[in-house]
Amino acid sequence: MHSNGSILVVTVEAADELVISVVDNGIGMPDDVARSGLRHLEHRVVGLGGSLTVTTEPVGGTRLTWRVPLR
């Protein structure tokens, strides 16, 4: 794992939208990291009317949230 994390939690929720969250306890997302894979994920979800967010957790680690409306 690039993040130096030891824990990875994946959550999937489905109601009016599908929400997939991936959270690790690593070092967070450095500003200078290549984001080509993330851009690809974002392009796909925006095409479906959804969104992608990547944030650094307050206690360290990264949270990726992918959400798309269910029709």
Image: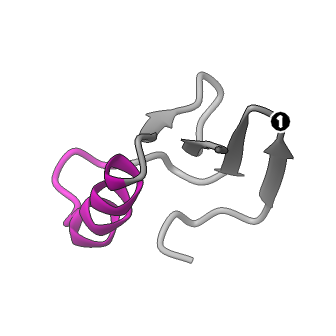
Q: Is residue 21 magenta?
A: no
Magenta residues span 30-47
Give the residue displayed 33% in from the left and 47% down from the top.
46
Q: Which quarter of the picture shows residue 54?
A: top left
User: Could you say which is closer to the camera, residue 33 or residue 49?
Assistant: 49
* x 45%, y 41%: residue: 50
Residue 36: x and y, percent?
A: 21, 70
- Disc 1 element: loop
Residue 49 percent across, percent down from the top left: 41, 41
Which class describes the residues within 10 Å of circle 1: few (<14), some (14-19), or many (20+)? few
Judge from the rendering whether residue 27 lies leftward or rightward of residue 35; answer left or right: right
Q: Is 32 included in the stretch rendered in magenta? A: yes
Q: Quadrant of the C terminus?
A: top right
10 is higher (above) or lower (below) than 46 = below
Q: Residue furthest top?
A: 58
Q: Amino acid at mark 1?
A: Ala
Q: Is residue 35 above or below residue 12?
A: below
Q: Is residue 48 visible?
A: yes
Q: Nearer the viewer, residue 62 or 60?
A: 62
Please give the name of the residue rendered at 51% of the width and 63% of the height, measured from the top-left corner: 3
